[in-house]
Image: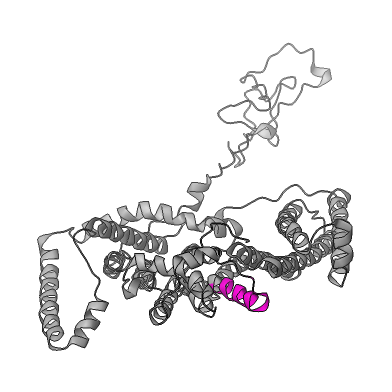
Amino acid sequence: MPDGTGNTRDTGNTGDTGNTGGATATGDTGRAEQPRPEAAGNAAAPAGPSPTPPPRPGAHSGAPTGPWQLRPPEPKRPSWPALVRPAEPAPIGTATLVAVLATGLAAALLLADGMGPGLPLAVVPAVVAAYAAARAAGRRPRPWTLAWAVGCLALLVIPALRDAAWPVTLAILAALLLGALALHGSRTWPGVLLSPLGFLDSAMSGIAWLSAGLRARGGIGRDRWVPVAKAAGVALVLLVLFGALFASADAAFADLLGGLMPDVSVADGPFRFLLFFLGALIAVAAARTAAGPLRWDRITVTPGTPRSRVEWALPLVVLNLLFAGFNAVQLAVLFGGYDKVLRSTGLSYAEYARQGFWQLLWATLLTLAVIALALRWAPRGGAGDRRLVRGVLGVLCVMTLVVVAAALRRMDLYVEAYGLTRLRVSVAAMELWLGLVIVLIMAAGLFGARWLPRAVAGSAAAAVLVFGLMSPDGMVAERNVARFEADAKIDLAYFQSLSADAVPALDRLPEPQRSCALRGISEGMARAGEVPWYAMSLGEHRARQILRERPVTVSYEVCSRLGAFSGRSEY
């Protein structure tokens, strides 16, 4: 009879209990007992059934017994798409539906003429849609969620302040990252890196989610849309009627009303419909993500095989010695050794600075890769190994910070010789951020690395925000105007490609340099024509005021003689 383990216990009923020469079953092991030597010659056979030979290891049988019992199959690990898939979200609520519709209308009305204050205004209803969907799903905001949401909205203010496209583009991308982190709640490296991809999945599944919600409310039945259409029609008639009366009664109110209302024409109808669709789709994706986000944090990255101390530490110690030698030379040059270096190398002051910056930037990036790989294969035997890893990588981080300082000093020398440009200010800002990442890695080695992915993402977004608020085009113009005031050197051709953010600084130049520097920007704004308030940044508004009060007066021929349109730039 079964004993609960899969073995068959003998109860003594073997069929021939009196035959001592037959094989008897042992109740404790399930094996057949071998005949005793003195009974080997007995010819009598047991009356019971002959014992079954034991199964071979690995053989499959219906009910294996004893030590040959089969192990249950190991559960199959789910694929990562199934692993991150969330549960079904709660049905879409009425508040979410209204917010999605408001987002589409705001995008169609405010973004057709460009991105300015209209962009954050169009995003606010999408934030409301996501919040309403999260509340309906039972999700509550956490401190990190609120921080990401506030950072996302702060970054979307940059298009309202700056006219230059490149800091605006960086701000929108960083806002997308923070919005994804706020909605997904990710805290690991896979989560931080993959969270923005969740919007693509939410956009596809969000349409089905929206359709299911509409069907649950009766779709577009007559009893649903007729009252709403009547109310909207009455509101529109009242606005048009009384708005026209007040506008005809007061010219100032008419001018104010004309500036506030979007100028909608039949010709741009298809484009505005496309903006409506995209705005509503983004709002649905955000709400669907808030209701049921993908669980990116469930993806685990297994560490590499730990190496021995010698195998792991020797290459890094050699690298640290190389960094130490390079940094010793940099410190010697920094404290008054430029003349000797220039005489020995035959390079000019600017050539020496330009030659080293890009190499040092790549050295910083490669050092981050080396640190990541070293942590993957670091020895993990105990406290001694942890001290070794912290010591070796800590020295490497300190040496890298000296390299960052040397790279920034090289860039400063280069700017003194040739002036500031967009490329130079952007790569210098990137080098500063890489130095901040090195400091965060050092702090993680001391206090734990659980918070490091979110700290790196937050530092990147903060750097983009500060970069946009500082107005890089304004910085470029300001630095070059100061250089002109110091040594009368200026490259008027380069200013033709700057944005309206550079106008306040360039307005300080004397004539004819001022008009020649501003001509390209002035002609660009003239071609754009009048821009409504919701599409005009603060930088463009200030530039239009300055050029309206002090327009460009120098002729094209004079500017050509000064090299403003030569197509060649010393930068």
What main secondary structure does the magenta stretch of the protein show? helix
Is 521 placed left or right of 305 in the picture? Answer: left
The quadrant of the rendering that contains the C terminus is bottom right
Relative to the observer, which residue lies in front, 161 or 80? 161
Relative to the observer, which residue lies in front, 24 or 475? 475
Tell whether position 229 is magenta: no
Tell whether position 481 is magenta: yes
Q: How many marks?
A: 0
- Where is 329 relative to 543, above or below? above
Region rendered in magenta: 474-489
Q: Residue at x 76, y 50 (%)?
A: 377
- Where is 329 relative to 207, above or below? below
Q: Quadrant of residue 490?
A: bottom right
Image coordinates of residue 192 in percent, x first then y, are 56, 60
Tell me if residue 506 can be seen: yes
Q: Quadrant of residue 534?
A: bottom left
Image coordinates of residue 163 in percent, x first then y, are 45, 70
Q: Residue at x 74, y 26 (%)?
A: 33
Tell me if residue 171 can be seen: no
The quadrant of the rendering that contains the N terminus is top right
- Where is 441 relative to 363, above or below? below
Relative to the observer, which residue lies in front, 24 or 88? 88
- How is this picture coloured? one colour
Image coordinates of residue 462 in percent, x first then y, are 57, 72
Is 21 placed left or right of 528 in the picture? Answer: right
Q: Quadrant of residue 389?
A: bottom right
Image coordinates of residue 319 in percent, x first then y, are 84, 54
